[in-house]
Every structure is written in C-alpha cells, then in structure tokens.
Image: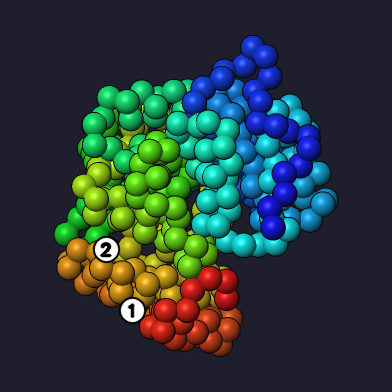
C-alpha cells in the first residue's frame, strides 16, 4: 500500500516556479544522481517521488533533495513495477491539481528549460498526446534515443531528422515525456500487466490508435542512462544492449503481449517477430549465463502466450 511521507507536501518553496506541471519520478535504489535530478526538476515544476521498495539507506541518499524541493514522497514498500508506480504518481499529481504530468526515470537529468519547452510545444501542437525531449545516453558514444516510424517498426532518427527541430515520433520513452492530464484520462493509465518493459511503447500505441500524434522537440534535452552493458557485433554500427536474465524474461513476454494486443500495424508485427527471434538467439547463444537466460526466455514465451502478466 502506498504511503506519503510527511516531509513533503508537493509545495514548491516560495519564489520557485509554480506551474500546472507535476513531475513523477519513480525510484528503486536511488543514489546521488537521483538527488541531482529531483533538485533539477524542482526548479521547473512540482515533484512527486514514488519509491518502489528501496532500502532506508538508499532513501536516505535523496531525503535532503526531497526536503529542499518540497517534494512529495510516496513509498510503496515493495517493487510493484514501473507501470504501477507511475500510475500512483499520476493519481497523486491529479489530486494536486496538475494539468500536465512529466514522467521521469531516476537516472535522467533534464536541461533547465525542459519543462517550459515541452509545455510550449504541446500548447502549440493540436492533436498531440505527449511531447518528449531529445534524449542522449550519458556516456561516451551513447545512443540518441529518438524513435521514428519506419517500414517495420520504430527506428532511431537520423541526423537530418534530428536537425529539423520537431519530429513526429513513433513512440516516446517515458523519461522526460510530458502528457496532459486530459489525455491520460482519455487514453487510460499505464498497463500494469507489463510491469516494466514496453510500458511506454504500449501507452503510446494506445494514444496513436485514438488518433493522437507524438512529438519530440529537440530543443528540450535530457541525459539518460539505460543502465545496460553494451557489446559491438561485426557489421553492426549500433551497439547491442546486453540485458540480464530477468530483463530477458520481461522483454520477451511483453513483446509477445504487444504482438497479441492488436495495437501494432501489420508490418510492425513482422518487425517485432524478427526482433524477438534475433534477441532470443543472441542472449541464448552469445551472452554469458546462457542457461539462466534460456530459462527466462522460455518462461517469457510461455507467459506471453498464456497472458500471464505482472511481476515474474
């Protein structure tokens, strides 16, 4: 059960920006980088931190930032999944009177004007469900995480597309995504059966099915860490993300959920089937801890086919 800590009441200190935007930051094992994120967001909007079962020691690393920000801390006591935590935060933001929600992972860092830039873009873009920033991984040679429509599904935007300023996106990563509350009311909450992976993609597909657009404003910048080890393969320009066994389970299961959802265009279904085969083969044959990975992949296929969602 969620409980609100008494330190913060979601009130921005006097003299700080007070807007209709509330940022929802989901944490699990937060660190000093999360404290920097909370302080950065609090200079732009009100902040709700939803913690997914971190230890008291981990929470202590952000307690000062929460106090400084006048943020609301909601503790869930267990790892309930990012989708549930986001929904709890969105509900709290609604109770606070928010007209917009900014979703954020704990390992991101926004530019100082990100919220204002995205809100202005949304306000000038009719029919838009959400606006996202230009996201770059905060490591040398990191990827630019902006996705556009291609024939067989979402692919990363090319340099000339990124130079355009505003991009029609295939979907938006949750971190840094600004969504009007009225759109959340219409499209619905995050799908908690997914637990973690593809939660943002599934929500964006629901929004697009209702006729909404998704946009990226490259003038809004966000540093982000995917947290995965990467490896480079011959004849492939982009690095391959090496996921742990449990993430293999969720990615396989939730990709099958997407394939069965009716939300994917026909050619995207082909693209995701091919991706699923390549992903499974790579992690089963070329990665370490192969036996454990294979077991999780098999479990993901099983649960995806029978429709068993939630936590593994």
Residue in the picture at 48% in, 37% down: 101
Density class for disc 1 (Cα within 10 Å; few <14, some 14-19, many ≥20) is few
Viewer-proximal residue among 156 and 174: 174
Closer to viewer: mark 1 or mark 2 = 2
In the image, is residue 90 above or below residue 38? below
Image spot of residue 125 (x, y percent): 26, 30
Disc ID at residue 263: 2
In the image, is residue 186 above or below residue 217? below
In the image, is residue 43 above or below residue 4? above
Q: Is residue 137 left or right of residue 73?
A: left
Image spot of residue 44 (x, y percent): 55, 24
- Give residue 164's quadrant in the image: top left
Q: Mark 1 highlights which residue? A: 277
Q: How is the image coloured?
A: rainbow
Image spot of residue 146 (x, y percent): 34, 45
Viewer-proximal residue among 145 and 84: 84
Name the image quarter holding the N terminus.
Answer: bottom right
In the image, is residue 20 above or below residue 174? above
Residue in the picture at 47% in, 79% down: 308
Density class for disc 2 (Cα within 10 Å; few <14, some 14-19, many ≥20) is some
Viewer-proximal residue among 309 and 277: 309
Question: Callout 2: helix, strand or loop?
Answer: loop
Q: Is residue 9 left or right of residue 261?
A: right
Residue in the picture at 72% in, 44% down: 4
Q: Is residue 271 visible?
A: no
Image spot of residue 20 (x, y percent): 49, 26
Q: Is residue 184 left or right of residue 79?
A: left
Residue in the picture at 58% in, 84% down: 292
- Give residue 155's quadrant in the image: bottom left
């Amino acid at each position: 059960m969620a409980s609100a800590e008494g330190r913060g009441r979601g009130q921005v200190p006097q003299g700080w920006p007070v807007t209709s935007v509330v940022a929802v930051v989901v944490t699990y094992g937060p660190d000093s980088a999360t404290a920097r994120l909370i302080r950065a967001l609090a200079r732009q909007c009100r902040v709700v931190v939803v913690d997914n079962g971190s230890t008291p020691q981990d929470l202590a690393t952000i307690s000062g930032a929460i106090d400084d920000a006048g943020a609301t801390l909601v503790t869930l006591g267990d790892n309930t999944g990012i989708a549930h935590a986001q929904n709890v935060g969105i509900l709290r933001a609604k109770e606070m009177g928010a007209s917009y929600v900014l979703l954020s992972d704990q390992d991101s860092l926004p530019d100082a004007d990100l919220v204002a830039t995205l809100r202005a873009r949304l306000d000038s873009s009719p029919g838009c469900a959400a606006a996202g920033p230009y996201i770059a991984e905060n490591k040398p040679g990191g990827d630019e995480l902006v996705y556009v429509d291609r024939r067989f599904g979402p692919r990363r935007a090319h340099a000339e597309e990124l130079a355009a300023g505003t991009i029609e996106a295939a979907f938006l990563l949750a971190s840094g995504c600004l969504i009007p509350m009225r759109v959340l009311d219409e499209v619905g909450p995050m799908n908690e059966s997914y637990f973690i992976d593809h939660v943002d993609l599934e929500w964006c597909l629901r929004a697009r099915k209702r006729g909404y657009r998704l946009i990226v404003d490259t003038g809004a910048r966000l540093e982000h860490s995917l947290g995965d080890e990467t490896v480079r393969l011959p004849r492939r320009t982009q690095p391959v993300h090496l996921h742990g066994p449990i993430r293999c389970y969720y990615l396989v299961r939730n990709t099958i959920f997407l394939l069965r959802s009716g939300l994917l265009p026909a050619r995207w279904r082909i693209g995701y089937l091919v991706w699923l085969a390549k992903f499974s083969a790579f992690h089963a044959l070329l990665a370490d801890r192969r036996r454990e990975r294979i077991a999780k992949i098999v479990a993901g296929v099983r649960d995806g086919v029978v429709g068993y969602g939630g936590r593994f």
